[in-house]
Amino acid sequence: MAEMNSLTCKPRLSFWTLWNISFGFFGVQIAYALQSANVSRIFATLRADPHSLSYFWILPPLAGIIVQPIVGSLSDRTWTRFGRRIPYLFIGSLVAVLVMCMLPNAGSFTHYINAMLFGVIFLMLLDTSINMAMQPFKMLVGDMVNEEQKGLAYSIQSFLCNAGSLVGYLFPFIFALIGLQNTAAPGMVPDTVIYSFYIGAVILIACVIYTTVKVKEMPPKEFEAFHGITAAEKKEKSDFVHLLVRAPKVFWTVGLVQFFCWAAFMYMWTYTNGAIAHQVWGTTDTASAGYQAAGNWVGVLFAVQAIGSVIWAVILPMFRSRKLAYALSLFIGGVGFISTLFIHNQYLLFISYFLVGCAWAAMLAMPFTILTNSISGKNMGAYLGLFNGTICIPQIVAALVGGALLHLVGGQQVGMLVLAGVLLIAGAACVFIIKETYSRHEEAEAGR
């Protein structure tokens, strides 16, 4: 116990310091929301078969599972005048901005390269860069925030994430309202989508510059003191396999919950557009005005999901039991997905996606709070990068089997949303397997 008490506890940070640490996440999430809501629409417009759509979604998590651990591990051992995490998020954001200006124009390069191939390449580049920019924000909270404030810090991050999502999801709908063309020639992406990506790119780089200027990371000596890292520990060489072998049990139990959750949301991103077009507009023709109107409405529904997530994120801290809050949130989201099978009115779908937002709020905050409390600062970045595998692997698996499962549900894309609901409810049941633990340093902070 004396060893724990000798550790230096991280100071309390002001609300605005916590805000600044995560503010750039607002811009990154706009980019992620635009990708999530429009990638299936873009590829469908480029004439991709619905049974093949899930295969295009393999690329983003595949990029993430490779990039995130590398960024985490390298940033653990990096120090520059700008810090250890910030250089990676800035470079990732800069690449994302360039790619966002290119991806929606895939149909314009057919004289030089197949439009589908162009889209695939730039989708991989976009998600690689977004992953590179996104993960350092979670690492900054783990690095700089004490145990007592960590829940608040991740709640702020969750709020900014959902606010960014709200903006990104609504852009095409808003641009259609103000008169931009929402249809285009066959094989071309509508102006509403193209300009959404342009504006999103501008906001992304502006937000990241703000965080880069406002946040000063701990110098190495100070970081080591706050995290109780000894000279002997600094000399230890830990590869990814070694870290996984020594990972706390909570890494794996939370990972099991993550598997069901992220597989469910993969199916939401992949099949919502087709499901809503069929259920509400009664069309499967991707060139029709009805299908493109459904595409805009998907952005509105995802925005409702983000609003539900923001509201539910405020309620979550009121629960005395973190596990009960986590499980209940996932169960509610599962009910929301299943309800889409019975709804044919576009406005009633607000209820479904509001409920889905409850699950999203828990998924953004709970896993990282539980995990970062259980690991030490020395390998914080590497572990968070590896933990991203619990987000990427289920998406890859879901994408690989998505086409076959779509056949099993009779080719009805709404059936995949029902399956997403079942997966979330399974994840809710697995929450009760988790046993929360604390690292040596977090125990010291919690016991101050």
Image (spheres, rainbow, N blue to C red):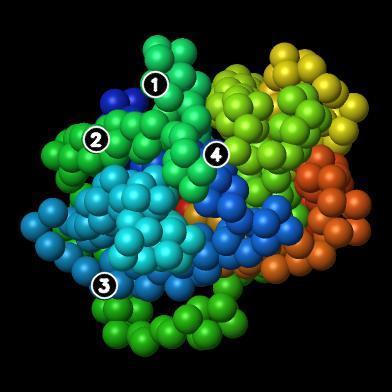
Residues at discs 3 and 1 in contact (Cβ within 8 Å): no
Residues at discs 2 and 3 in contact (Cβ within 8 Å): no
Mark closer to the chain start, 3 or 1: 3
Residue located 52% across and 65% down the image? 59
Q: Nearer the viewer, mark 3 or mark 1?
A: 1
Please state if 334 lies on the left or on the right of 98 as rendered: right
What element does badge 1 sit on? Answer: loop
Q: CA distance from mark 2 to mark 3?
A: 31 Å
What element does badge 4 sit on? Answer: helix
What element does badge 2 sit on? Answer: helix
Q: Which residue is mark 3?
A: 77
Question: Residue 70: x percent and y percent?
Answer: 38, 73
Question: Residue 419: x percent and y percent?
Answer: 84, 48
Q: Nearer the viewer, mark 1 or mark 4?
A: 1
Image vertical order of residue 408 relative to residue 171, above or below:
below
Residues at discs 4 and 2 in contact (Cβ within 8 Å): no
Q: Quadrant of residue 436?
A: bottom right
Mark closer to the chain start, 1 or 4: 4
Residue located 30% across and 36% down the image? 198
Q: CA distance from mark 3 to mark 1?
A: 48 Å
Between 74 and 133, the one lying in front of the other is 133
Q: Nearer the viewer, mark 1 or mark 2?
A: 1
Please state if 257 lies on the left or on the right of 57 as rendered: right
Three-letter code, disc 2: Val
Q: Which residue is mark 4?
A: 37
Mark closer to the chain start, 4 or 2: 4
Q: Which residue is mark 2?
A: 202
Q: CA distance from mark 1 to mark 4?
A: 18 Å
Quarter of the C terminus within the rendering: top left
